[in-house]
Amino acid sequence: MTRVISIVTAAYQPVPEFLRAAYESILVQDLPPGWTWQWVVQEDGEAGDVAALLPEDPRVSPGHGRRGGAGVARTLALSRVRGELVTVLDADDLLMPGALARDIEMLERHPDIAWATSRALDLLPDGSRVRVDGEPPEGRVARGTLLRLWKERGHRLPVVPATLCVRRELLFALGGWMALPASADTGLLLGADAVSDGYFSAEPSMLYRKWSGQVTKQAAHVDAVELSARVQVIEQRAVALGELFHPAVRTRRTG
């Protein structure tokens, strides 16, 4: 039986050439024997325009729904996800060769680990690639490590949450992506970190496109009031998950 890794993409008025490049970066992925991929593209809105931009490929699953932000769109996309592993690819980013295979092989090699992240390179408008500093060393990431580092570093993760690959069961148990106007991927990753060890690969898996139209460039993304609210909700959820899934932690704190 063929095994599937699902790639989830939320799209709102995507730049057609960026979306096409994202698909082409999936096409060059060389998966382990017995595996295939599924690209689940969810338009964040009801216009239905994105489907016309997608290729005729049975591995591509388009859909659309009411606009609610990238996190809501990704969560709606889960209704069509067939993979036992689920990863993310934003509509303006690119997978690097070998990205999916590395995630598959690592999670198969470590059945007790529920998620994986990896290095990402910034892709600048001139085509140059820049490495982001401050990442953890390659290897196993103990449960709770990312939350601790996120808090120590002024609520900045040491990894790019858009590189997350997670087991389907945990993704559904966590309710998909958080219903936040931004940082939904950070919330999901810290939720996964709260309940399971993970793995960080130092081999780059993604090109993170830097351009004027990206969501993180918009003023609303750094609005102080909203940012504070997002941070509080993400942190409190991660802490609560850690205590619920690992009662010994709560016992040590209250005993």
Image (cartoon, rainbow, N blue to C red):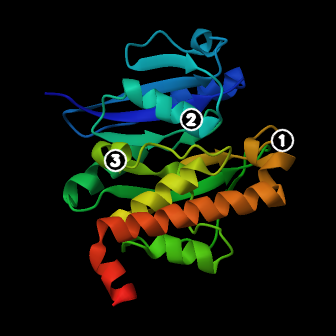
Q: Nearer the viewer, residue 72 or 80?
A: 72
Q: Quadrant of the N terminus?
A: top left
Q: Is residue 205 visible?
A: no
> Distance of mark 3 from mark 2, alpha carbons?
16 Å
Amino acid tagged 3:
Ala
Q: Which residue is mark 2?
A: 72
Residue 155 rendering spot, x and y as whole percentages? 65, 69
Describe the element under mark 3 as helix, strand or loop: helix
Quadrant of residue 40 within the rendered picture: top left
Name which residue type carries label 2.
Answer: Val
Q: Is residue 196 above or below residue 13?
A: below
Answer with the quarter of the image where residue 18 lies.
Answer: top right
Please tell me which residue is depicted at 80% across the width and 59% down the height of the picture: 225
Camera-side mark, 1 or 3: 3
Residue 191 found in image quarter:
bottom left
Residue at screen point 19% across, 33% down: 34
Q: Nearer the viewer, residue 19 or 215?
A: 215
Number of other residues with Cα within 10 Å of mark 3, as a class: few under 14, some 14 to 19, many 20 or more: few
Residue 7 x/y as whole percent: 44, 34
Query: What residue would you read off at disc 3?
Result: 173
